[in-house]
Amino acid sequence: MAAVLLILKIIGVLLLTALGLILLALLLILLVPFRYKLEGSYLEGVPDGTVEASWLFHAVSFRVTYHHGAAVSGSIRILGIPVKRIEGGVS
């Protein structure tokens, strides 16, 4: 009988831990603000601009830059580590 109760106790602790982690993730998604910043100009017919976005105090960030109508560059970072780089010319 004691072995059955021990097994049920372990299962209960594991389920409560999983439920707590799911609740924490849900609260992070709902309560941590999403920040963004847009800058741009259009001087002498030449567009120029930057788009930046971050979430969870810059743990996840995104940046794209468009310079003088010639090239698009940017990156996606998680914890400061570049995950994806965006580079290309505009035709």
Image (tube, grey):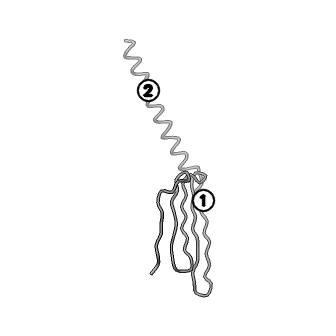
First along the sequence among labels 1 and 2: 2
Q: Residue most toward the bottom?
A: 44
Structural crowding at the residue carrying mark 2, measured as other residues with C-alpha within 10 Å and reported as few (<14), some (14–19) or many (≥20):
few
Is residue 5 or residue 69 the one in the foreground? 69
Circle 1 residue: 35
CA gap, disc 1 to disc 2? 38 Å
Quarter where residue 49 is shown: bottom right
Structural crowding at the residue carrying mark 1, measured as other residues with C-alpha within 10 Å and reported as few (<14), some (14–19) or many (≥20):
few
Query: As shown in the figure, which amino acid type bears the numbered disc 2?
Result: Gly
Q: Position of residue 73 (x, y in %)?
A: 51, 69
Circle 2 residue: 12
Query: As shown in the figure, which amino acid type bears the numbered disc 1?
Result: Arg
Q: Position of residue 26 (x, y in %)?
A: 51, 45
Q: Where 87 falls versus 23 (above or below)?
A: below
Q: Position of residue 78 (x, y in %)?
A: 52, 53
Is residue 57 or residue 5 the one in the foreground? 57
Q: Where 14 falls versus 45 (above or below)?
A: above
Q: Residue at x 55, y 70 (%)?
A: 65
Mark 1 lies on a secondary structure that is strand
Screen quadrant of the N terminus: top left
Q: Residue at x 62, y 84 (%)?
A: 43
Q: Residue at x 53, y 41 (%)?
A: 24
Quarter where residue 61 is shown: bottom right
Image mark count:
2
